[in-house]
Image (tube, rainbow, N blue to C red):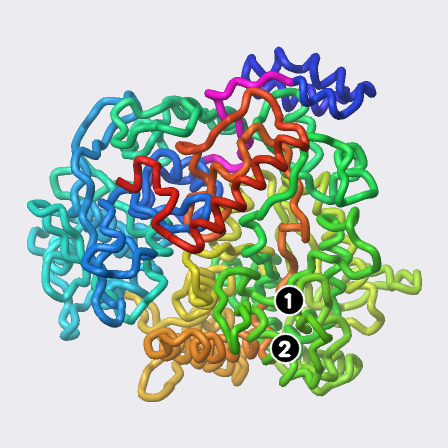
Amino acid sequence: MNTLFRKLLSTLSATAAVTLTASSVVACGVGVNSLLNMVNDPKVMRLPYTYNVSSYNTARTMQAEDQKVLANTNDTLLSTDEFGRIYPLLVENTSGVDGQDPTYIGKFNSDKSEWTYKIRKGINWVNSKNEVVGTVKPSDILTAAKFALMPENASDVSSLWTSFIIGAADLYDSLLSNKDENGNAIVPDNPEQGVNYTKPYVEKFINSDKFGIVANDETGEVTFKLTKPAPYFESLLTYSVFSPIYTENADGFADDTADFSKAYFNGAYVVTQSNPNNKVILERNKNYYLEQKRGTVERIEFSYVDNSSASRLRTLFESGSISEFSLSSDDLKGWKKFVGSDFENPNFEGIYATKHPDTAGSFVLNFNLANWNAVYGQGEKQKQAQAASRLLQSDDVRSFISTTLNRSKFVRYFSKTIDTNETSQMLRNSWTGVGVASTTVEGVKKDYTEFVSDRYDEIAGTTAPTGSHTISDGTDVYLNKEESLVGKTKAQLISDIKEYIKANNITTTSTKVTLNNGKKVTENRVVLRLIASPTGNASVNPYTNLMLKEFNGLEGNPIFIQTDVPSSTDDYRQQGAQGAMDLYIGGWSPDYSDPATFLETFTLGGSYSSYNGTARLIRTSLKSGEKVGTAINDFTEYKSEGETIYFQNAYYVKGETEKAYEMYKKFSDEYQKIDRTETESVSRFTAFSKIESDLLYKNFMMLPLYTRAMPKQYVVSFVQPWTRTYEAFGTGNYRYYDVVLNQRLLNRESVQAVMKAYEENLAEVSADPTSHRDQDHWK
């Protein structure tokens, strides 16, 4: 056993250390099916984590790693079950009441722009000592609103509030500009409140009829008044964005905290221990409001893994340190051991294939048009950032990178075991993920991504292959497609980019390059920084470098992309959130079941505005001391349809910056119009697919890279199959309250029996959505 593995296990629990012998035995050649003899504690779920919890405030964070904990400690209003149904969690079940569609939980108006729910009685707030400190009330949702809509709190989820709740955008914009809806300065009611001077204004606004959430603590009801009809709204309530939060502060405003001892919980588990880069322990909430009829998990242990590569997780499972792992194709040894050459008849009796939430998630390369370092960096770092930001505002540059990067070189890290040719089977060509939303066209189910594919065919002049669609996962619709997508050859793009660099005095750097023909040269190029997580140093980062090496080695290329690896994962996350990079690989999974959950991220002010730079590039007002002028930190004024916009000169390129702004504005305006007016699914998907396709294949504002889900996802787990949800939207797939943990792994025959029973139950649920509602949350 190597030293690195010993060091890793030393950071885990004493239990993990005890089970090292089992791991050694397996590694030394005993048949893989001996794992069927492992004995597991069905009361303890053991899981890895790679990032420390950034916040225990559900109105603050949207980080997936945080949700793995919060989904178990802080309940959402609704959740999803193993059949894909939405069920009531914090709210009472009114499904089918008064003749309404039984697939919905709440009461709604005719166009589904207003939804009403009743909070269950007797739900307690507890602290980390499992002591009751209060009860959950409808007004706790307003406490979440107060936090999310104050710009100074930098909430990750504020854009969802402003997108859906009437008045939320007005409040947020007022606080951002310090002006009320009439343009008057917001004057504090109590000047002695200092930096919190806006709190009285927020309190007054949220409790007025201008705000679209009406909370009645006496009746227990809460009504959401939406900015638009949203038939899919209940899928959003399975996510924590509108969940209640608790505060003991006298002013009714909650704090942000990464300290579990200062957090409050209403879920099935309570955080009782949290040591950074070590262990997070969750114990059963003895004051929980639902009866655990099926689930067996009483304790959840998260153990820190500084490099969660697939082989690392597999070996941790083999040692008994974690309760499950998904077999990834980058784990060559594991694939050979557990699956072998016959996908349909795996070597290991206890492995099974299942639906995976990752199918709906997409990872993309973000082009940052306004690197934070261009203003706040020092010396050469600042000069490089200014040059990169100006370069990436060129359409030619983004299209050249998109059609020249061989994405498969990078993505093959995830897919090399299952690939049959040079194109990775896990390449993705859309932003919205597969399976996020679908509709029926002429009696046939059609996924939203097929609408996007139809639009790609129109742009590129291609024809979809029989029985499939052009942009399906595992195809490359970008590489060397510049002539069909842009109307220019690669040589023309290179020539135009060089002219752009010269005309705009963009700084180049003397760079040593090994060309693809093996020749070593020193050339002046514009350098772009792609930051990569240090957790990938021994796994995915070398594949990133392979992709970039081929790109950089193209003869005549005026661009050089270098990989920068921050010293820690926390530094990596901070640089990404700041936008202190030029290129960034980021992912997104759906918050709700509609394409808007992806497309909103690239609107002005959307969730990705820090990563693509629009949050810094585009200003609607100047702060005290800032002015229009010619200095590098001054601003250039721009008039657009009667609106005054300011661009900081550190990023500004005459003509190109205005063009980039107009592109984002057009996308944002069209998104808003479609989202608010198109409610019929076919027309909605058709309209959305047009603006997504223009974003990807005409304007190249980001480059899709990959899906983390293999075509067939194999799992080895003590979790009983289909005792949890596998839906991609919401946080239900992280909840373990209803999960059944087995004492031993099921063999193939047992798995098949479980799967057969599930399929039979699913057929019954499809025929009658009210069947199989025996869990306590349905009451």
Task: Specify the farthest residue to the right.
Answer: 518
Which numbered disc, 2 or 1, marks the residue that appears first in the sequence?
A: 1
Would you say 474 lies left or right of 649 here? right
- The kind of residue on which mark 1 rests is Asn
Segment tinted magenta in the rendering: 38-52
Residue 244 spot, x, y in % from top left: 25, 44
Residue 63 spot, x, y in % from top left: 45, 46
Can you say whether 499 is above or below 506 in the image?
below
Q: Quadrant of residue 431?
A: bottom right
Would you say 322 lies left or right of 69 here? right
Q: Tag 1: Cα neighbours inside 10 Å, few (<14), some, or many (≥20)?
A: many
Q: Quadrant of the N terminus?
A: top right
The foreground one among 772 and 484 is 772
Would you say 778 lies left or right of 669 here? left
Residue 310 numbered tag: none
The foreground one among 318 and 692 is 318
Residue in view at x 35 percent, y 42 percent:
773
Residue in view at x 50 percent, y 26 percent:
45
Residue in view at x 7 percent, y 51 percent:
190
Residue in view at x 65 percent, y 57 percent:
706
